[in-house]
Image (cartoon, rainbow, N blue to C red):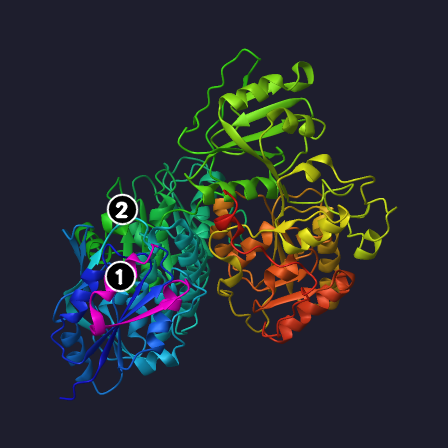
Amino acid sequence: MTRELVSIVIPVFNGADFVAEAVESALAQSWPETEVIVVDDGSDDGGATQRAVALFGDSVRLIAQPNGGVAAALNTGIAAMRGDWFAWLSHDDLYHPERIARHVTALMARPVPMVSFGDADQIDRAGRFLGRARHTDGFADDGEVGNGIWAVLEGRLNGCTMIVPRRSLEEAGGFDPGLPTTQDYALWHRLALRHPFLPVPGALVRQRQHGGQGSRMARHIEEASLLWVSLLEHLESLGGTPADRLRRLRRAGATLRHAPYHGARRFLEARLRSAMGAFGADLVVRRPAGPDDVARAMRLVLDAGLRPGRVTVTDERHYSAPALSVECPGTAATATVVRTGEHPSAALLLEAALGSGEERLSVILDAQGLPPGAELVEGLRAVAAGASEAWIAPPGPGLCAAVFDRDALKAAYAGPAANAAATAAVLARLGRTIGPSDVPPAPALPRSIPRPPVPAPLRMHIADRPVLARMPDPRRPTILMLLHDWGGGTLRYVETLGRWLGERVNLLYGWGVDERLFRLGSQAPDIAELEWDVASEGLDAPVMALRALGVERVHVLHTIGFDRWIEDFLDAMAVPFDVTLLDYHLVANGAHLTDEDGRFVGDAALEDPDHPARRRGPPRLLLRKADRRIACSRDLAWRAGRLSGGLPIIAAQLPEPGNPRNFAIQAPDLADGEALRVLCLGRLAPHKGIEDIAAVARLAEARGLKLQLLCLGEDLARLPVSLQSSGTIRLLGGFAEEMLNPLVCELRPHLAWLPFRAPETHSFALSDCMLLGLPILATGVGAIPERVEGRPSTWLMPPEQADPRSVVTWFETLVRDRMRTAPRWLPTGHLPAWDEDFYARSFLR
């Protein structure tokens, strides 16, 4: 047997605690032809990781690179491989000595290139056994291309249990650095489309479980939801009968229902409901008291997505009772009333089910004992998919709820002459009772997650001692962040910066209300705990309180609500302070540099010293006296510098989680004849382009462009009802930040459109669209060009060209090109450079 070289690649970042054990296990392999490559991905632990690896001398090839994430480190290792086979070992995991030999031997015995995978033991930080993941159990080793799709969807793959032919890795494009926590499963899926997957039973890897791993991060849940959505879309594209489609979705859902990927679960539920639309159901409704009971029973069936067929109502009252009159609201179906007399037999109900129509499914529901909707939906799906010939609800009085495959019922049922025993045998053979393993998927998440009520702030006076929920730790510096109470981007900016600072400093949050009150909190920038009436009592009391709390520096992010007091306040505090510009409030006569129509006044207008948008006189005193003036974008630093008479301003990039600009595009394909689904994200207001949204919708309808504008955000100005009625515009309302990913996974837009009219100084709507992996069409005003420069599937319109007709023309072009139009960016060479790593290097200095 040829002894082919296997390359074991170990990516590591700050892994001095475990990497030596991992390397030892790699060097201890019984397969003689191995090489070990360690890629140090920019560790900043003072050289500890590299020293731990250096102890192995020439037995290990050590490659150091700037930090780029796991995918970049793995790709570096693959590029350096001399072997024909790739094996991944995480720096905190361990190989069994036979790990490589067992897998390579199995792979080399196969006639075509395959990808192997195995089982794994979980261990804790100290190496103690926690449990075994039996990934190979029940996996069909059929050698068929595509079997690996189910290994991906059923969570059977741990990258460190796999071996992949090097050529296959290269053909599949390697690991995608744009997917920070799902780069592995995305690659395994691409490989599964090209090669069979080979299970090699046996736990030959020990996987360490500990906090801080990528899969435990909140961002991973959102990223994994997007990946799952694309995997489910691929499942649906495989063709086959409606039952095949439904079977595949249900099989994938069996894994997904136990995962925390809320967005993917919402998408799956929507696709399952769509798949059920291929099936019809005839309905028998027992014992209704009136039309409302029939309507409730029908709603259960309609909510599952089924086409309604014929409806039969059994009147089980005494024959002397007056005839029932029932309707089927919301459908074209009509109800036929059949008088059965009291306590009809199961045989009679089965006869009614068989005689009620010709749809694939027959459903019997007792109006006086309807089953939980989720249980019925599961039963309907199981029978429609062919997983069961029938579903019968848990035992109750009579036949209360049942779903039958009509053909199976016809074959099993002997007709009205059947006696009770024979009928019971039919039900026993066909039916089943819902059990613990049949728990339906978790329900769709609510639009928002309620926040616990917050007590009103305590009114303070000059003699009061300040007591906060989180008192400052005297071992750490204390910074007061000043902002406004309007929420929006300023609030999110402060929250993001606060999360990044973590426990390195004590953060207090202060803001003014109507130039009258000063409020203070320690828990979050929108939870007030204490307040002072500065309009009546002056600044002495809050200043004394803040000194008592140990405030050493003030960081001014906004002054609205406290504008008339801010400079006196800073003088009284007598501590160093910085100013971060998040808009133009401190350097112009408005926050957005717009005219009365909400449009950008233009750069030429800003050159005019008498232009009404410019603030007259010298720059504000707090700007001149600030230790540092910081802008949240290069464009804002450039414009604010001009408007403030040349004051030096630092352009500092907010340390946003998830690296929005470099996140991979994750949009669905646009099918022939399909309406282009366009997400309009964020608050709908004049300077955000609400009037352009309405105009674009009208033009699209006039030109016959199939378009659906999905407006997800608060509506501050009304959009025409006619455009909503036609479906061109869908107003979806506001949302909680944590709900955005699930909502967009369910909506599945092809594109995001940001119709800004004013110079965006940062735009969290843009950040969100990038983190959702969406192609973007936007007005290239303010910070937008610098933030998307070099990003694929992104198209910018200069502000003077971003009229509704041009937007519709862009939509038409993107539809014609199937979203493959070359990206269009705008120049940024005139802007000042970023102060690189300002927050990491300089902010707390």
| Dot in front, 2 or 1 | 1
> Percent x, y for residue 780?
69, 61
At 73% from the left and 63% from the top, the residue drawn is 798
Q: In which quarter of the image is residue 460?
A: top right
> Percent x, y for residue 137?
18, 65
The residue nearer to you, when weighing 490 against 803, is 490
At 49% from the left and 40% from the top, the residue drawn is 498
Q: What stretch is highlighted in magenta?
A: 45-73
Determine whether, in the image, residue 692 is placed left or right of residue 147: right
Amino acid at dot 1: Arg
Sequence-wise first label, 2 or 1: 1
Task: Check if residue 10 falls in the magenta segment.
Answer: no
> Percent x, y for residue 425?
18, 55
The answer to whether residue 393 is seen in the rendering is yes
Residue under circle 1?
51
Residue at the outermost top position: 463
